[in-house]
Structure formats: C-alpha cells, structure tokens
Image: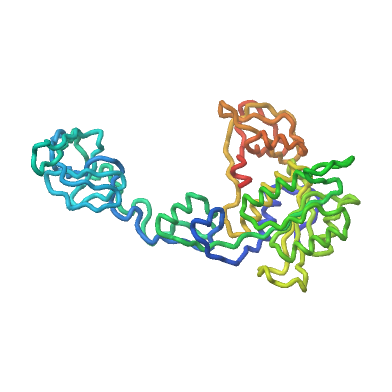
Amino acid sequence: MMNQNRSLISVTEALEQLLAAVRPVQQVEVVRTLEANGRVLASDQYSLLDVPPRDNTQMDGYAVRTADCVSGTARMPVSQRIPAGHVGEPLQAGTVARIFTGAMIPEGADAVVMQEQCEFEPAAADETNGLDHVTIRHQPKSGEWIRRAGEDIRAKSVILPAGARLHPQQLGMAASVGLAELPVVRRLRVGVFYTGDELAMPGEQLKPGAIYNSNRFILHGLLQNFGCEIEDYGIVPDTLEATRGTLRRAAERNDLIITSGGVSVGEEDHIKPAVEAEGHINMWQISVKPGKPLAFGEVRRPETGGTTQAQDNDTAFFLGLPGNPVSSLVTFALFVRPFMLRLQGVADVIPKRYPMRADFVLDKKDRRNEFLRARVNAEGGLDLFSNQSSGVLTSAVWSDGLIDNPAETTIAQGELVQFIPFSELLF
C-alpha cells in the first residue's frame, strides 16, 4: 500500500507512485499495419530490406556520367527513358538517360542533372532513327541528386522499438519495408462512471439544482483518443450500494476503472468506502491546481465472474478524478494518460514542455503547482485565460495547452514559462 498521508504531495511524486504500481498488459495480438494506428508495438520491428532498395534519383532530369560533363556545356544524345518503376539499360559513355523522380539510376551513371539545367533538342523530323539531344549546362559532382540504397533504412535494422505508440508516420515506415502486419498490445479495457444525483444528460430537462454531465463527454472522448475499449456505466446514484455494484461489474470486465466526482470525504461521497469494501484505495491530496483530490487503488474481480475477457490480473486498477470539469480534464492529462500508456508498455510517457514567452503578468502566488490555461498569440507568445477556475470549461476550449507553473511562483511579463500543448496531453 502506498502512503496515505493527507499532506500535499507533488505532481512528480504522485506520478512516480502511479507508474511504479503499473502491471503492463501482457496480451498481444497481430493486426494489419493499415489498422494499427494508435496501437502500441509489442516487440521490436526489423526492416526486411534496404530503403531505398537501389540508388534512385531525387529529381526529374538526366542521368549522366560526370566524366562526360566536365566542359559545363556538354551536348549528348538521349539514349533511353527511365520512368519510376522501370529498370534502365547500362548507360553508354557519351550518352544521357532521361530519368524521372524515384527511378533507379542506370549502371554506369554517377549523377543526375536536374532538367532546369539542361537544354533539350528533339530529333529532326526527317531523321531516320534519330535521337533527341540535350546540352548539359552544368558540371555535376559524383552522387549529385542521387539517393543511395539504404540511406534511409538498412536491412535487418530495428525500425520501430517495442513500446512505440504507432502514428501514421510509423505505419508508413513499417509499410515501406514490407511489414503487412504488426504485433501490438491488446487495447486497454476501461470502465468509466460518474457519481452525483445532480447530474443529468443533454436532452433531459434540468431539475432544480441539476447540471448537465459534461465530464462524461470529456472522458469518453479522451478514452477514444487513446484507442480504449470503453465500458460506460453512465451516472450512478449517490448510494454506497449502487457504487459498490458498479465497481464489481466494471472490475469483472476491465483493466482500469475511472470515476468522476465523489472523491472527497463528505457524507454523499461514496467512492472511498465503496472502493475500500471492494479492494483498497489511496486518497491523495496533490499539490496541483486545478485537481487537488485524486484517488488511486485496485478493485477485486468477482470470484465467480469468469474470465471470458482473459484478464491478466485478479484486480482492476482504479482512478477517481475530481468532479469539476477542468479538474477532471487536467488530472486525466497529468496522471491517467501516462498511467494508461505505461499499462500498454510505452516507456516515454512524460509530455514535452516547451519554453515560451509569457505575454501577461501573474503576480499572485499559489501554494500549489498550477497548470494554467493559455493560448499562443500571433506574436508567438502566450496569453492567459482570464478566469482560471476549475469549473470554467471555456478556458480549456479557448486555450492551446497548459503552463506548468511551480508552486509559490509569480510570472513576469516577457518571462519564459514551460508550456505543454494539448497535443502532448490529450492524444
């Protein structure tokens, strides 16, 4: 069990404890490379060939022997035409080959001259078996405009390491070396539910004191971004029995259970006693703003629940997020995202931070590590949203990311701050 001390712990300490508790998913499946976007590689992938497989041209132009072009104005016949995908004949001395981008360099040629540096002369109409000619107005160097075989990828080299999260560029690389299928970690199964009798769904009439459940849409969308298989149990009544029952159902089928709301210690907050009854829980007070409360634990799977989902362990992880929408979004980005990625075997889960200029003043210190909603302006600096309250979802829509501002720190106009774009946090 982890330390349940009620004093504030740092963002770094909380994340370290979360990641140390991870038991990575072990199950692997093979999928078509075309369908592997967003998945995590289960093993190193090796190139089946050199890329490019043979020397080829980077430009439309003429393949030449540099020895024939030393004059700078060499006039020679065009002996052949080589489109991409075709193999030319060996290039004879004193001739050139018309060649197109991507085509293989013919044997004997050692450079390509781009067509803009050549003057083309078609064969005379009355000339039998006549050849076109070009004047090369350039002195090429050996290797000019030639891509060498294997200069991008060498055969048998590792092109993608185990634990890599696959994006379109990685899929393109796998395809470029002939990998039609890839072994990937199976998708995470995540159960999610929301507590609060005040919650209603869009489309329903709001009763007095009710609010629409924006967090359901935020968390569902985020889990979709990470390719999870989602079991959405909706809004759970504010009772201990209902909360425990939903936890049991979610633990039977999922690797991770996420809840929103109910992680405080009030009389109507049932998450803590429910998870304690079904497993164990740590209630953390994190030095983070927004999002101070975070619950982490594990929930036992029902003994008679069966194993049709082929789970790896006899417990499901649990993460309880605060109910305010911006707090929920920020705690997901800071803690749930890296936890889920590490569950799938991803090594590098810490989002990149970029130094950027603050075009604002923040003269009030906070005892917590603040994550401020900010937007990149036309001058390349950062503007700060005027209302940083954890309930103002407008701030997250308006902004491009978060400023990581350490505790007890003010920000002066023009000072460099650490900015984390949402592209690093929400995808």
Residue at x 79% of width, y 51% of height: 194
Residue at x 63% of width, y 32% of height: 375
Q: Is residue 356 left or right of residue 278?
A: left
Judge whether 70 appears above or below 278 on screen: above
Which quadrant is the N terminus positioned in?
bottom right
Q: Residue furthest front?
A: 126
Q: Position of residue 51 (x, y in %)?
A: 35, 54
Return the residue nearer the eye: 22 or 75: 75
Q: Residue furthest right?
A: 267
Residue at x 71% of width, y 52% of height: 14
Q: Is residue 7 visible?
A: yes
Q: Is residue 352 left or right of residue 364?
A: left
How did the renderer colour the structure? rainbow
How many numbered markers are drawn?
0
Which image quarter: residue 174?
Answer: bottom left
Q: Is residue 427 left or right of residue 255?
A: left
Q: Is residue 319 visible?
A: no
Q: Is residue 419 left or right of residue 133?
A: right
Which image quarter: residue 144?
Answer: top left
Which image quarter: residue 295?
Answer: bottom right
Judge whether 129 appears above or below 193 on screen: above
Judge whether 375 appears above or below 276 on screen: above
Q: Position of residue 289 (x, y in %)?
A: 74, 41
Q: Position of residue 402 (x, y in %)?
A: 65, 38
Return the residue nearer the eye: 37 or 158: 37
Q: Position of residue 377 (x, y in %)?
A: 59, 28
Return the residue nearer the eye: 119 or 353: 119
